[in-house]
Image (tube, rainbow, N blue to C red):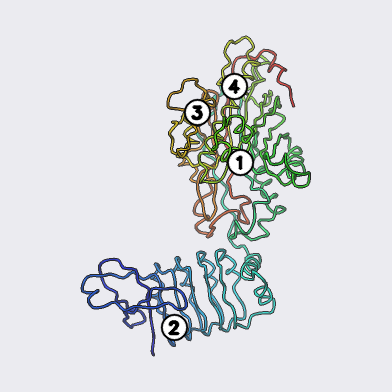
Amino acid sequence: MGTWCRMSPMDQGSGHGMFEILGISFNKTYDSPNPRRAHSIMSAEDINAGKRSYWPELEITGTIRNLSPELWKLQHLTSLYLNDNNLSRIPPEICRLEHLTYLDLSSNKLRSLPAELGDMIILRELLLNNNYLRVLPYELGKLFQLQNLGLKGNPLSAEILSIYSEPNGTQKLLTYMLDHLTVNCPQPEPRQWVVLEQPDRSKPIAVFTVMCYNVLCDKYATRQIYGYCPSWALNWEYRRKGIMDEIRQYAADILSLQEVETDQFFNFFLPELQRDGYDGIFSPKSRAKTMGETERKFVDGCAIFYRTSKFSLVKKHLVEFNQLAMANAEGSDNMLNRVMTKDNIGLAALLETKEAIFDNGAPADPAAARQPILICTAHMHWDPEFCDVKLIQTMMLMSELKTIAEESSHSFRPGSHAPDVNSIPTLLCGDLNSLPDSGVVEFLRAGRVVTTHADFKDLCYSTVLRKLSSAEKSGDDFTHSFKLERAYDNEVMPYTNYTFDFKGIIDYIFYSRQHFRQLGLLGPIDESWFRDSKVVGCPHPHIPSDHFPLLVEFEMQVGPSPVNGLTRSLVHR
């Protein structure tokens, strides 16, 4: 049997270019993956000089009917050409070649394909032309990165060929197949509750839970972004049920939500959660102000919900980063062109506790039961190239929270001379789109960040940002006045955002350390579920968002009795 095998070389400096497969030895190689690719033969001089070839591409051409199992051990391959042979089947073990981006099986005698082909998710080209295929495994729909699917010359059904022949037929066919693929993987096991401390039962304490959750708004949930998820599982009507089921399962007392569309807040989240004993506030991103009524419905924003049996709303405060950037630009081109053009927001709610929040009995002084608490949610700019914008948005947020806290502190203790921002218990939740080692997290946790931090990208913000710093003379640092701690550390939750392209921590809950103790928190989804179920990213039919909700139980210390509760100069609006 005559066989021709080529391998595309990459010089490695030592070794030799010989390779044995199917019982035959070859030293033929090629160096171009295109149809007119050329091959070269390593000379004896190259071999004697210790020149080494690394071949990520392999071609086997001839009258091959069977493939050696040794082939599936070549897991370094990126291209495999098995076209123009007499292969009647491809074994499931082909999925072991997990680095393949190009696979040509054209002009064989294939009548079926292994479902395991669908696990080769980095394939960009799959050529199956001129075989005897009548059906395709729906698992091919999982090949969401596939750009070219060759099916010509196969006796496929009229329905499949009709979809394939349409403009953008490859993508339409992949969507069709993924949508018809039965979801066989089980639901993930319930996330485990991690107990950190026991509540202090010796005195009245306020115990409550807080959830932070980016729910992934409908307009971002597209197959172009999340091609690994069936379109029916991206549909808002399907996902919103899963989101609400998750919210209800954990029944947090305070909900901090991001990417809530305006229309969905008023027509879904608010009425649903009001039936469950919540009330809430919302604000869309700043762009909504420039839009008509119809377009404004689809602008996403931030929402805060609170259980009305435990909290009442005193004041709502919107933080618009583009407006603050314009007010503080002082002629800075970078502030105007980089920061002001991003319309992210923060949303704060000044709440007051009710007696129902207290474990072990309410305080003896009824007025002491009315404790103020400042809740903030935020959604920072997403683009990693704009780490300076994220950090500046965070600085502006903390500056605004300082103003809110000082106003609240003055009303809470009208006799005090200097308002103290740390006298108001504060929780900051949000999708900060920043990793744990970023300037954003360093600034929040340490209370300072150097003016020369790499995240500022040497863009000369120092002068215009000085007024946002809490200290008048802060030297080489920008500072804020709050004493915050992070609720989750990296070991507890390895990622809060889980997609094919990115898996990491970008969602956070920060709390004022002198007022709160963490009693417990919700652990991660078991990593074995992702591995065993071959889940490459979220959303997923079992997981409605690409973010996982954070949930923390806090114990809040009861402070000095307020004078008539919070002074009503803080108008509820």
Q: Which residue is mark 1?
A: 342
Q: Which residue is mark 3?
A: 463
Q: CA distance from mark 1 to mark 4?
A: 30 Å
> Disc 2 or 4, which lies upstream in sequence?
2
> Disc 1 or 4, which lies upstream in sequence?
1
The spot of residue 199 in percent (x, y) is: 55, 27
Residue at 69% across, 35% down: 305
Q: CA distance from mark 4 to mark 3?
A: 30 Å
Q: Which residue is mark 4?
A: 424
> Disc 1 or 2, which lies upstream in sequence?
2
Q: Which residue is mark 2?
A: 66
Residue at 71% across, 41% down: 288
Q: Amino acid at mark 2?
A: Asn
Q: CA distance from mark 2 to mark 4?
A: 74 Å
Around disc 2, counting alpha carbons within 10 Å, would you say few (fewer than 14), some (14 to 19), or many (20 or more)? some
> Disc 3 or 1, which lies upstream in sequence?
1
Element class at badge 2: loop
Residue at 52% across, 80% down: 106
> Disc 4 or 3, which lies upstream in sequence?
4
Q: How many marks?
A: 4
Q: Amino acid at mark 1?
A: Lys
The spot of residue 360 in percent (x, y) is: 62, 23
> Disc 3 or 2, which lies upstream in sequence?
2
Q: Amino acid at mark 3?
A: Thr
Query: In front: mark 4 or mark 3?
Result: 3
